[in-house]
């Protein structure tokens, strides 16, 4: 009986985590302390009505705007957090590790992992799937003086994301890594 109660308690704790993971949404830590230490930071949190509003702004004749609208149309939530620091190792790797542990669930698949020993930088890109449908994307780019975490939830066109490099808070390097990930995932 005691073992049954332990399993039930574990299931109750694990259920919310599996529900969160199934739709491609990550539970991100509170980054306010990190933002206070950063020399520069950008935090973007968009969902529902705001995404719909953004999707109606801009000139549709502009190819970049049209591409952004196409990408946003399938999204339910966008979280982009970028922090730059004036000193090396100003953020805790434990915050990053909490996010990486969520990405170990079965519906998340790492499609890109890069490591630059000289620059001490890592980029990891994960895709969450539900059957054949991509329903989430997570990007973690960590360098000694910069940390970027991106979580997109909803139907995602990875090729479209790669074309948005340098826009909407997505660096060209992250977009290039996403593009190489789509080619890797297709192989």
Image (cartoon, grey):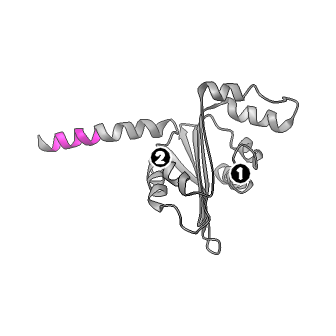
Q: Identify the main secondary structure in magenta.
A: helix
97 over 144 or under it: above or below: above
Rendering coords of residue 145 (x, y %): 61, 64
Most distant residue in the bottom direction: 118
Q: Give the magenta part as a residue range.
A: 3-11
Query: Is residue 119 covered in magenta?
Result: no
Tell me the residue at 53%/64% (across/down): 90
- Indicate which disc residue 151 carries: none
Q: Nearer the viewer, mark 2 or mark 1?
A: 2
Instruction: Classify residue 87 by image quadrant.
Output: bottom right
- Residue for badge 1: 175
Q: Residue furthest left?
A: 1
Residue matched to label 2: 30
In the image, is residue 3 above or below residue 98? above
How many circles with numbers are drawn on the protein? 2
Marks 2 and 1 sit apart, C-alpha to C-alpha, by 25 Å
117 horizontally vs 69: left or right: left
Query: Regarding mark 1 in the picture, which secondary structure is present there?
Result: helix
Q: Residues within 10 Å of mark 2 (few under 14, many from 20)?
A: few
Q: Residue at x 47, y 46 (%)?
A: 30
Say what secondary structure mark 2 lies in.
loop
Indicate left or right for 6 with 155 as reference.
Answer: left
Image quarter of the N terminus: top left
- Image spot of residue 93 (x, y percent): 48, 61
């Amino acid at each position: 009986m005691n073992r049954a109660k332990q399993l039930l308690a574990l299931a109750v704790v694990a259920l919310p985590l599996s529900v969160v993971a199934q739709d491609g949404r990550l539970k991100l830590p509170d980054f306010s302390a990190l933002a206070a230490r950063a020399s520069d930071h950008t935090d973007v949190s968009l969902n529902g009505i705001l995404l719909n509003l953004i999707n109606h702004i801009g000139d549709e004749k502009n190819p970049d705007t049209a591409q952004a609208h196409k990408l946003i149309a399938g999204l339910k939530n966008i979280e982009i957090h970028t922090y730059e620091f004036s000193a090396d190792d100003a953020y805790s790797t434990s915050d990053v590790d909490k996010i990486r542990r969520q990405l170990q669930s079965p519906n998340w698949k790492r499609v890109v992992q890069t490591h630059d020993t000289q620059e001490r930088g890592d980029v990891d890109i994960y895709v969450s799937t539900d059957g054949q449908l991509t329903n989430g994307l997570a990007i973690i780019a960590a360098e000694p003086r910069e940390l970027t975490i991106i979580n997109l939830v909803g139907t995602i066109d990875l090729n479209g994301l790669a074309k948005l490099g340098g826009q909407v808070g997505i660096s060209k390097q992250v977009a290039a890594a996403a593009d190489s990930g789509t080619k890797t995932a297709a192989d």
